[in-house]
Amino acid sequence: MQDIVATINAYIWSEGLIYLCLGAGLFFSVMTRFAQVRHFKEMIRLLLSNKESDRGISSFQALAVSLSGRVGTGNIAGVAAAIGFGGPSAVFWMWVVAFFGAATAYIESTLGQIYKEEDEGQYRGGPAYYIEKAMGQKWYAWIFALTTIVAVGALLPGVQSNSIGNAAELAFGGGSTINFLGDSVSTTKMIAAVAVVGILGFIIFGGVKRIAHFTQIVVPFMALGYILMALGVIGYHIGDLPDVFAMIMKDIFTPMAGFGAAIGWGVKRGVYSNEAGQGTGPHAAAAAEVDHPAQQGLVQAFSVYVDTLFVCSATAFMILITQQYYVEGVTAAISGGVASSDVIINSPAFTQMALESVVGASGEIFVAVALFFFAFTTLLAYYYIAETNVAYIRRTIRFPGELTILKLVLITSVFYGMIRSADVAWAMGDIGVGLMAWLNIIGILILFFMGSPAVKALRDYEKQKKAGVEKYTFDPKALGIKNAGFWE
């Protein structure tokens, strides 16, 4: 099984996808005249908007739902894996993919808003919707929708729950073992699995409003608490900070930074973490109640910064400054102070060990708790994304109990993810991320050359902003944008 998954993964995450992610980000940065830099102040202002309706959630809630998907296992275990497989310079390439990816996030999320529609009393939208309406290729939209349902409903949830189980086991010990379906599972993992599944079921059966209200409370506190803890660790070793920067910058263009190492792992884990271009962000963006589509696009661009430049960087600096890592397959001179046999790279172990080296055993517990919230809110986002794509397919074909089946599949995937190996869980997750990224990035590039609706929306927004309007409006027909039925 592991060999089959690894082979598929190697094809999907070839150099082509890495070039595509970086190239699309650079292209959209140039085409929007680096909107992710020019409108940074506007992003902050829009975050404070609290416009909510019976049909849509507020910009901040949409950001929280989106961040709950972006800020997850990738920020703790994913960063550790990037360093472990790609070396410290992988962190630089995570920053690069975040900076350029913010422009990609603007494009895809604005498209999500432009082509959203109302479905049974709530807003729905995402790549499947804008591929069908803007590109006119329903078959392509269906492929994306089905791929996304499988990816976020079955493949990716196991990555999140696997990391929760590993972190809990490292923090609290394994305890006795239970034989479950032929595997020996620790009681700690089994208790964690039952708890996560129970709470998750309660929330996802409550619908998108319950998900939005839960995440808008939990996400800001968990991210801020984690960053403050990281700053404490960095402050404890502040004299070593220049050496950490030097370590990150040292190999960014050397042979070690080849596509199998720093660049490859930095981009892979960067896209996994911030999800720019993957096509997940537009689902939450489309659910927001805004006056102009570009507003939510800018808010989603900011979420990429929060995810990678803040949370991922916090993890990376903690690991590197405490020397609690090693790099697979390289000499000890560029590895940290951890023996390669001590930990599994595809796990939160490096992060837990970094905190433990400063605050003792409570550090491992803190990471386990942080990871629980990070991963749990990501599971909520995954469910919402899968539900949106089921709703898209339901416009054509309906069958009884489809959402109940989806919920049960996701919950089963979460439970099973707790007990399978970390390598298989991450590899299956990478397949899901990679397939969605291929389909979505190619789609938004085609849409740019078919009329660039998201760039037109940005120019229209900038024009109104310059004119000092009190209330923004959006008229797609006047801009030459077709099939934006909601706004028409």
Image (cartoon, helix red, strand yellow):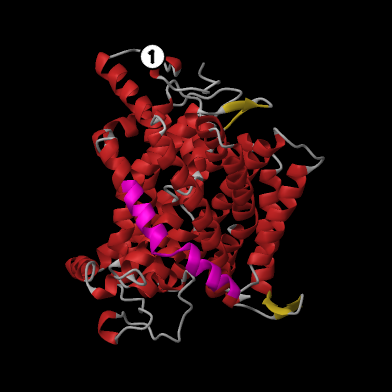
Residue of label 1 = 471
Looking at this view, is 488 or 197 the one in front? 488
| Residue 321 is a magenta residue | no
Looking at this view, is 2 or 350 the one in front? 2
- Image coordinates of residue 60 in percent, x first then y, are 46, 34
Looking at this view, is 348 or 12 the one in front? 12
What amino acid type should be assigned to the residue bearing mark 1?
Answer: Lys
- The image quadrant where one finds the N terminus is bottom right
The picture quadrant where one finds residue 38 is top left
Question: Vertical placement of 331 versus 232: above or below?
Answer: below
Instruction: Tell me which segment is drawn in magenta.
Output: 4-25
What SS does tag 1 mark? loop
- Horizontal relation, residue 29 to residue 480: left or right: left
- Horizontal relation, residue 460 to residue 407: left or right: left
Question: Vertical placement of 248 versus 178: above or below?
Answer: above
> What residue appears at the point 39 percent right and 68 percent down from the top-left corner?
82
